[in-house]
Image (cartoon, rainbow, N blue to C red):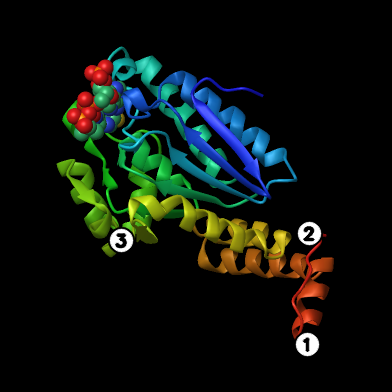
Amino acid sequence: MSYQNLLLSVKEKIAVVTINRPEKLNALNSDLIDELKKVFTEINKDEKISVVILTGGGEKAFVAGADISELNKLDMISAKAFSEKGQEVFNLIENLNKPVIAAVNGFALGGGCELALSCHIRLASDNAKFGQPEVSLGIIPGYGGTQRLTRLINSGRAMEYILTGDMIDANEAFRIGLVNRVYPREELMTKATEMANKIASKAGNAVRLAVKAVNAVDEVSSKEGQNYEASLFALCCGTEDFKEGTSAFLEKRKPVFKNK
Ligand code: COA
């Protein structure tokens, strides 16, 4: 499948999706949202892919937000559909059956910050900038940001960033737990690939089920979450990879996982 605004490369179980509209700082227009839906739907089905890295094309931006020239034309009816469509795609990413690492290589503003929030792990370059500047445009975040940011960094901080629209740099984003790690710009993709390879070397079913278990925290009570965890733990123990992983440890050798 070919894309106008995205690049997809797959190498040794790792897919790299690059949002490639650098002349507009990778702003998400409707075509891009459609293509993100297509590419992540394909990746979800592709058993050769174990981990995904999502990044931005060019030197300046991960994604500088929803495309403001499209936002400008919305009315109340079309805005609801616009928001729900973006939410659907970001939910697809969050619920993908393989981990997605955001390699945030510059501005991650508005919908760009929300896109990073829908990924499972966020790595940032030292020039990255994060923010939810929607109030400056007369709107609020509409791609899940009010919910995901609040859950990730706590409601007081999320409220501050959403109400002021202030941008923060990568180090501040790290300090408040918005990103997992910060690297020099030129090292970001190498570090993201190293992490992706490390995850891809583990038992695939365990990784997949771990993502599901952690994601469930936003959906259910702690008691239900623990029941769900126990069920997924039990599922893991029915896999060949569980036998291999535990046996390899006891036999003091490296495991060879078959993803079965
Ligand atoms: N939507 C549409 N176009 C955008 C965009 C967006 N969210 N963000 C940047 N662009 C476009 C600019 O209009 C400009 O296009 P042009 O060259 O045709 O005029 C191009 O990308 C480069 O951006 P520019 O503003 O010239 O770069 P800069 O380095 O001076 O500033 C930003 C960078 C990110 C601070 C600035 O582009 C910005 O504030 N963008 C909007 C961020 C935002 O509010 N996002 C939330 C949307 S919900």
Q: Secondary structure at mark 3?
A: helix
Q: For the view shown, which residue lies furthest in the front direction? A: 186
Mark 1, residue position: 250
Q: Position of residue 208 (x, y in %)?
A: 66, 56
The disc, 3 or 1, on the residue closer to the chain's N-terminal end is 3
Q: Position of residue 24 (x, y in %)?
A: 33, 24
Residue for point 67% across, 41% down: 44
Q: Amino acid at mark 1?
A: Leu
Q: Secondary structure at mark 2?
A: loop
The residues bearing labels 2 and 3 have C-alpha atoms spaced at a distance of 33 Å
Mark 3, residue position: 174
Q: Amino acid at mark 2?
A: Asn
Q: Secondary structure at mark 1?
A: helix
Would you call the spot at circle 1 few (<14 residues within 10 Å), some (14-19), or many (20 or more)? few
Mark 2, residue position: 259
Q: Is residue 164 left or right of residue 59?
A: left
Q: Position of residue 62 (x, y in %)?
A: 37, 39
Q: Is residue 50 left or right of residue 220?
A: right
Q: Amino acid at mark 3?
A: Phe
Quadrant where the N terminus lies? top right
Whether residue 126 is visible, yes or no, is yes
The residues bearing labels 2 and 1 have C-alpha atoms spaced at a distance of 20 Å
The disc, 2 or 3, on the residue closer to the chain's N-terminal end is 3
Q: Which disc number belongs to residue 10?
A: none
Ligand 1, by image quadrant, is top left
Q: Position of residue 190 (x, y in %)?
A: 48, 54
